[in-house]
Image: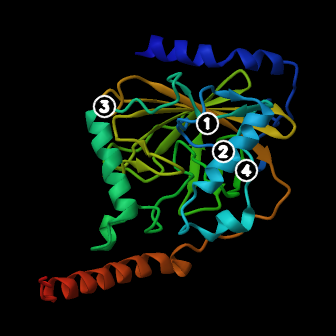
């Protein structure tokens, strides 16, 4: 399995050779300095939609894809989608991308039968679960957000502030409960019984690339939602992230997931963060979470309407 994963990463890496000449700013320890606020905003989905056939798009194909994706957006969606008016696809080192998935080459999540059932469960939770709060996703409940490994994106600007010290890199995502500490000092993880929504992230440097492996992930939170079908992560899943600063304003982000219980093969995805000249604000999710209450209230109203319809006499011709 490890040999296969190395081969997958190598297949996706040739474009990196063109960036070898770039020398990033460095910390006192000599490592690339990631400090700052980085963000990504695009319409590209995790998986490739059926109307796009190749990973890399031309400029015309990219514009057409945005038009189609925008027209397919449901009416009921986060207001940020309309306020921020994202109108581009993801770009990686100047290439327009049709999906975040690079491998498998068809751009589709390689779910096992168990993975398909879990993905369907997530879709039900996201669209129909309204009997109690526990039926909603952890994102809706302000428990976990887009900053969990692997970091996901939606068609809105969600900035990530990186704070780098000699012993760790802290990533704070302007989103639900997403404070991550990446330990780069070789510290041992906590006992297996100690888990969290973000997990325990251990980082090491491979040249100028920060490689992060995360363990101690909660068993009751397998869903990583974003834009499209979910990423599924369980305690035995292996999540490996790679951060490489490839220009003064671009931080390349690549991640792989291995789990033979959920996927028929390891898979790899990537996109790029852009350095942001913006202010980072507190994300007071619980204080402003009217949506959860309204979802449950809407469910009760639906129950009343269904009950009222059931009591109506049948009209006979």
N-terminal of the two: label 3 or label 4? 4
Alpha carbon of mark 3 to alpha carbon of mark 4: how far?
32 Å
Would you identify the image quadrant in which residue 100 lies? top right
Callouts 2 and 3 close, C-beta under 8 Å: no
Q: Residue at x 74, y 63 (%)?
A: 84
Regarding residue 8, the answer to whether it shows in the image is yes
Alpha carbon of mark 1 to alpha carbon of mark 4: how far?
23 Å
Callouts 1 and 2 close, C-beta under 8 Å: yes
Q: Secondary structure at mark 3?
A: loop
Regarding residue 219, the answer to whether it shows in the image is no
Q: Secondary structure at mark 1?
A: loop
Q: Which quadrant is home to the C terminus?
A: bottom left
Q: Position of residue 130 (x, y in %)?
A: 32, 72
Residue under label 4, please give it: 39
Q: Counting other residues with Cα less than 10 Å from the Cα at mark 1, is it few (<14), some (14-19), or many (20 or more)? A: some
Callouts 2 and 4 close, C-beta under 8 Å: no
Query: Viewed as shown, does residue 127 lie left or right of 210?
Result: left
N-terminal of the two: label 3 or label 1? 3
Instruction: Looking at the picture, tell me which residue is in the foreground, 37 or 129.
Output: 129
Q: Counting other residues with Cα less than 10 Å from the Cα at mark 3, is it few (<14), some (14-19), or many (20 or more)? A: some
Residue under label 1, please give it: 184
Residue under label 3, please give it: 112
Q: Residue at x 69, y 49 (%)?
A: 67
Tag in front: 2 or 4: 4
């Amino acid at each position: 399995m490890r040999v296969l994963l190395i081969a997958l990463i190598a297949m996706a890496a040739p474009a990196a050779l063109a960036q070898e000449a770039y020398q990033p700013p460095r910390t006192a320890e000599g490592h690339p300095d990631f400090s700052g606020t980085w963000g990504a905003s695009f319409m590209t989905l995790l998986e490739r939609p059926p109307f796009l056939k190749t990973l890399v798009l031309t400029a015309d194909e990219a514009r057409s894809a945005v038009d189609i994706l925008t027209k397919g957006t449901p009416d009921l969606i986060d207001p940020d989608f309309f306020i921020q008016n994202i109108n581009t696809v993801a770009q990686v080192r100047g290439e327009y991308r049709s999906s975040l998935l690079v491998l498998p080459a068809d751009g589709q999540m390689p779910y096992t039968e168990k993975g398909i059932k879990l993905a369907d469960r997530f879709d039900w939770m996201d669209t129909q679960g309204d009997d109690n709060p526990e039926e909603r996703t952890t994102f809706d409940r302000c428990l976990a957000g887009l900053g969990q490994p692997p970091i996901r994106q939606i068609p809105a600007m969600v900035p990530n502030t990186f704070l780098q010290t000699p012993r760790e890199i802290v990533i704070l995502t302007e989103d639900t409960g997403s404070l991550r500490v990446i330990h780069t000092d070789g510290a041992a993880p906590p006992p297996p019984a100690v888990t969290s929504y973000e997990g325990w992230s251990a980082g090491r440097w491979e040249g100028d690339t920060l490689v992060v492996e995360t363990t101690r992930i909660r068993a009751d939170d397998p869903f990583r939602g974003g834009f499209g079908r979910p990423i599924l992560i369980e305690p035995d899943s292996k999540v490996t992230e790679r951060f490489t600063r490839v220009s003064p304003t671009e931080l390349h982000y690549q991640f792989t997931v291995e789990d033979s219980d959920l996927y028929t093969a390891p898979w790899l995805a990537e996109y790029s963060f852009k350095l942001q000249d913006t202010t980072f604000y507190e994300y007071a999710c619980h204080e402003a979470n009217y949506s959860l209450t309204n979802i449950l209230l809407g469910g009760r109203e639906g129950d009343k309407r269904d009950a009222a319809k059931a009591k109506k006499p049948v009209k006979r011709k």
